[in-house]
Image: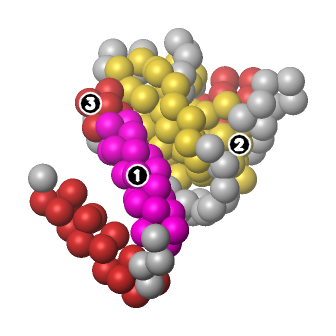
């Protein structure tokens, strides 16, 4: 369950694979870990954004207590966490010591997810395009209002502009 507090190695061992855990260890800020099922009931933990693997007992001893932030994390595709408003979207690089695969950790407020570098690039391009479109739309709205175009016509024009932009 998201928000569950983990304080023992047995609780870590009982987690399913691909859970995201967060430690608020004093002096370190939020530190994130992803669980992996190594088979035969062995759980390994990758430290997000750092070179480090942990066994359940080591993780709890060094970084506990931990909070389950999200379930269903993946180093090969985007992870979805329940998002709440607030904060800037941050990204940091990582590599799984367990799989050797690169990943990007995305943080928004208190939520964290991981995706492949290709998915991160696609997301970044989408964000840049949306930022450019928002500024362009705002300039057009400002000009249309300045020359006396009514609000309904302004709204229709911006809607049509977005339709044309999305089609190309």
Dominant secondary structure of the residues highlighted in magenta in the image: helix
Q: Is residue 99 left or right of residue 45?
A: left
Give the mark nearer the N terminus: 1 vs 3.
Answer: 3
Report the Cα–Cα distance between label 3 and label 2. Answer: 30 Å
Who comes first in sequence, dot 3 or dot 2?
Answer: 2
What is the secondary structure assignment of the residue under circle 2? strand
Q: Which residue is mark 1?
A: 136
Looking at the rendered structure, the secondary structure element under dot 1 is: helix
- Magenta-drawn segment: 124-146
Quadrant containing the N terminus is bottom right
The residue that mark 3 highlights is 118
Between 75 and 61, the one lying in front of the other is 75
- Decide: few, some or many residues near mark 1? Use Cα within 10 Å; few <14, some 14-19, many ≥20: few
Q: Is residue 40 shown to the viewer in this render?
A: no
Q: Quadrant of residue 26?
A: top right
Q: Which residue is mark 2?
A: 66
Q: Residue at x 61, y 34 (%)?
A: 32
Task: Assign a secondary structure to mark 3.
Answer: helix
* Position in image of residue 167 (x %, y %): 13, 59
Q: Residue at x 46, y 70 (%)?
A: 147
* Residue farthest left in this picture: 168
Identity of the residue furthest to the top in this view:
51
Note whether 156 is above or below 101 in the view shown: below
Do the CB atoms of the residues marked 1 and 2 lie less than 8 Å apart? no
The single residue placed furthest to the right in the displayed view is 26
Q: Nearer the viewer, mark 1 or mark 2?
A: 1
In the rendered image, residue 19, in percent from the top left (x then y), is placed at: 49, 46
Which of label 3 and label 2 is nearer to you? 3
Q: CA distance from mark 1 to mark 3?
A: 27 Å
């Amino acid at each position: 369950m998201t928000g569950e507090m983990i304080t023992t190695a047995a609780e870590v061992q009982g987690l399913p694979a691909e859970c995201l855990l967060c430690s608020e260890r004093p002096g370190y800020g939020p530190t994130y870990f992803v669980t992996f099922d190594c088979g035969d009931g062995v759980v390994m933990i990758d430290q997000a954004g750092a070179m480090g693997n942990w066994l359940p007992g080591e993780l709890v001893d060094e970084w506990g207590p931990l909070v389950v932030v999200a379930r269903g994390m993946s180093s090969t595709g985007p992870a979805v966490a329940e998002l709440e408003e607030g904060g800037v979207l941050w990204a940091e690089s990582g590599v799984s010591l367990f799989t050797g695969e690169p990943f990007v950790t995305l943080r928004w407020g208190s939520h964290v997810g991981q995706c492949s570098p290709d998915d991160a690039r696609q997301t970044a391009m989408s964000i840049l395009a949306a930022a450019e479109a928002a500024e362009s739309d705002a300039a057009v709205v400002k000009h249309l209002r300045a020359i006396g175009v009514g609000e309904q016509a302004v709204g229709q024009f911006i809607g049509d502009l977005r339709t044309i932009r999305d089609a190309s």
